[in-house]
Each structure stands twice: as C-alpha cells, then as structure tokens.
Image (spheres, rainbow, N blue to C red):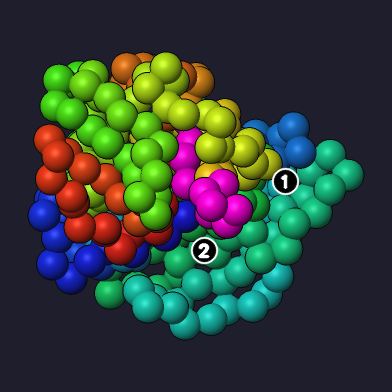
Amino acid sequence: MSYFVQEVADYPQHLAQAGHVEPVPRRLRGFFAGAKVFDTTRAIYLWEISAYPAFLIPRSDVDPGVLIDERHPHKLKFGVACRYGLRAGGRERTEAARLYTESELPAIVDHFRFEWDALDAWLEEDEPVFVHPRSPYVRVDALRSTRRVRIELDGVVLAESASPVMVFETGLPTRYYLNRSDVDFSLLEPSETVTACPYKGRTSGYWSARVRAQVHSDVAWCYDFPTVALVAIAGLIAFYGEKVDTFLDDQLLERPKTKFS
C-alpha cells in the first residue's frame, strides 16, 4: 500500500529520507508454505522511499534450503542485487527476494530484501505485521473527543456524532471514527472490499453510499479487531474524507488528496 501525500498539508509529514538505514530492535520471522524462511534479531530498516521502510534480513539468518538462485543480478537504486525465488511445501514463488551484493550503503550488503507479498506471514516478535513494516518514526494516536463531526455527501447527512474517536497518524489527515448508532446505515450498502494497515490491522467491513440513486463506492470502513494500540476504534465507523464532506464543529474541512485509510 503506497502513500500519496499532499505537497502542502495540515498534518505532520514523514521525516526519513530515501537511503536512511537503522537497526530493527525486534525479532522478525517470515514464513512461506509452512516453512520458516528467516528468523533474525539483526534485521535493518532501509527507507527506499520516505513514507515507510523495508526490512532487510542478514543472509546468515535466511534458510538457504528454501531459496532458488535465479542468477539474475541487476542494478537498483541503492546498489547491485541478485534475484532469488522461494521453494517450499510444494509451492514456488519467483522473484521473491533480492540479495544486495554491492552498495554505497555498506550496512545493506549481504542482506535480503523480500517482497512483502512473497511471504505468507511476517511476525514482529509474536505479532503479525500487515502490508509493510511499521516505521519507527510514525506515531498513531486514537483520542476520544467531544467535538462535533458531521459527514455529508451531496448534502445528505450520512453520520453525525458528538463523541468521535480521532485518529492522528503521521503522514495522514485526521480520521474520525464514529459510533455505529451515529451512522445512518439506511444510506449505506456493504461492500466486499478488504484493506489492511500496518498500524491498525485488517478491516472487517466496508460500505458504499447510495445517495439520490447514485452509488459512491467504499466511502466508509471499520476495524472490529484492530491492533492492541488502536483498540479504541474497535467496531467504529470511519469515512474517507477524500470522498465525503466532513464538518468539524460545523466547519467544512477541505477534502484531502491521500488515497488510503
């Protein structure tokens, strides 16, 4: 999942620059087809883009028995890498990882960078990680509030609350999570969409809005079982500020241009 950030925004932006490297002070494990691909306490973060880092895994902590050397060296932004696939449990995955063999960043040499979707599961300590590594520089706070929030679409009120939970996340506009009793579900239709967030977990519901016979797809979502850090939003409904009109204390907010929850 990629970040799309406004050039000028009224919320904190990401500070790390591409090429930044830091140690990962957590145990990481990755699994494919029931096999443990790696188990390390010596991983490093590499910011390939400023929004979030990638995990780089020391070669010595990767099980060589699951690797397929595709014998395809290629030049990347931060050096030269060789491409590897994975084989385990009767399954194969090509182009699953790359091993840095040369780099202007000495710390990343002899480290694997696995494609996120190439693995069936990633664990930080014993907790699953979704979508991409959590940045150590991103803060996500869920704060209860008594400010009034009203959600409209084409002048029709979809929700109104005086007890929102406001989620402040680095690099994203504020999200307003509302009690279900404050949402007019007669205007909403369930959607099959599922998304995930490294900080909040996996969504358990999405809704489109039908207003004046027009369907506006995927305007709202919820996390029934969010991560422990964001338990305050469990079961609450949030609306895409990008797709609806949001009024905070009766003041219409400008629609942000970001594209994910």
Residue 250 has which mark?
A: none
- The reply to whether the magenta stretch includes residue 190 is no
The C terminus lies in which quarter of the figure? Answer: top left
Q: Of all residues shown, which one is farthest toward the bottom?
A: 75
State the residue at coordinates (13%, 67%): 8
Foreground residue, 114 or 63? 114
**In the shown orientation, is residue 84 left or right of residue 50?**
right
Residue 94 in view (yes/no): yes
State the residue at coordinates (39%, 50%): 153
Residue position marked by numbered label 1 in the rendering: 65
Foreground residue, 128 or 257? 257
SS for callout 2: strand
Which circle, 1 or 2, is nearer the viewer? 2
Q: Residue 208: image x %, image y %?
A: 56, 45
Numbered range of the magenta stretch: 210-222
Q: CA distance from mark 1 to mark 2?
A: 15 Å
In this rendering, the answer to whether 154 lies above or below 136 is below
SS for callout 1: helix
Sequence-wise, the earlier of marks 1 and 2 is 1
Residue 108, by quadrant, is bottom left
Kind of residue at disc 2 = Leu
Q: Residue 193: image x %, image y %?
A: 62, 44
Residue position marked by numbered label 2 in the rendering: 99
Kind of residue at disc 1 = Gly
State the residue at coordinates (50%, 21%): 224
Foreground residue, 44 or 156? 156
Q: What main secondary structure does the magenta stretch of the protein show? A: strand
In this rendering, the answer to whether 157 lies above or below 177 is below
State the residue at coordinates (13%, 45%): 251
Q: Residue 253: image x %, image y %?
A: 18, 51
Q: Are marks 1 and 2 in contact (CB under 8 Å)?
A: no
Looking at the image, how many numbered discs can be counted on the residues?
A: 2
